[in-house]
Amino acid sequence: MYVKKVKEVESTIIGAGQGTSRQVLISPEEGPNFAMRKFVMQPGGDIPAHTNAVEHEQYVLGGRAKIGIGDDVYNVEKDDVVFIPAGVPHWYEVDGDEPFEFLCLVPNLEDKIELIK
């Protein structure tokens, strides 16, 4: 399928985070090289520190958040772009009273997610 409506794509809750859901807009079966996902984090939501075996390219659609990448913390908002290298610890916390929404593109390679305690 070349075109679809985002509102028609199933949304699933991210178990490791709080107040966070994900839609797989372009799955690995649909796109030969990259998958595209949309994340929505509600006010007060977060995703705990973790690593991935694949890089992430992200585009912020709306809201604000703090994102930890390695030892640095960034304040991001609408129209910011974020690059997270493979294997680098990262986390998210919504900042403000509106949902934080972003697109996340990842290569179609085997990914291993490890939570950091």
Image (spheres, rainbow, N blue to C red):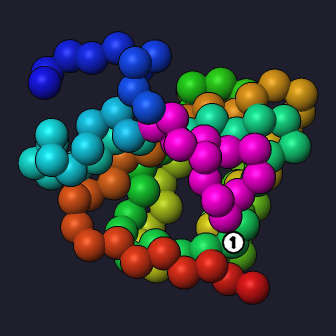
Q: What type of secondary structure mainly makes up the magenta span?
A: strand
Work out which quarter of the rendered image holds the C terminus and state it. Answer: bottom right
Q: Is residue 103 visible?
A: no
User: Residue, x 67% and y 83% (percent of image)?
Assistant: 116
Residue 34 against residue 23 in the figure, above or below? below
Crowd rating for badge 1 (residues with CA inside 10 Å; few <14, some 14–19, many 20+): many
- Residue 79 at x, y percent in the picture: 57, 26
Asked whether, in this view, residue 43 is left or right of residue 40, the answer is: right
- Residue 108 at x, y percent in the picture: 22, 59
Q: Report the front residue among 66 and 13.
A: 13
Work out which quarter of the rendered image holds the N terminus and state it. Answer: top left
- Residue 94 at x, y percent in the picture: 80, 43
Q: Is residue 106 visible?
A: yes
User: Residue, x 74% and y 29% (percent of image)?
Assistant: 99
Query: What segment is highlighted magenta in the picture?
Result: 11-23
**Kind of residue at disc 1:** Ala
Asked whether, in this view, residue 39 is left or right of residue 56, the answer is: right
Asked whether, in this view, residue 103 is left or right of residue 90, the answer is: left
* Secondary-structure class at tag 1: strand
Quarter of the image for residue 36 reads top left
Residue 117 against residue 10 in the figure, above or below? below
Q: Give the residue pinned by disc 1.
A: 49
On whether residue 5 falls in the magenta region, the answer is no
Residue 66 against residue 8 in the figure, above or below? below
On whether residue 18 falls in the magenta region, the answer is yes
Residue 86 against residue 64 in the figure, above or below? below
User: Residue, x 15% and y 47% (percent of image)?
Assistant: 29
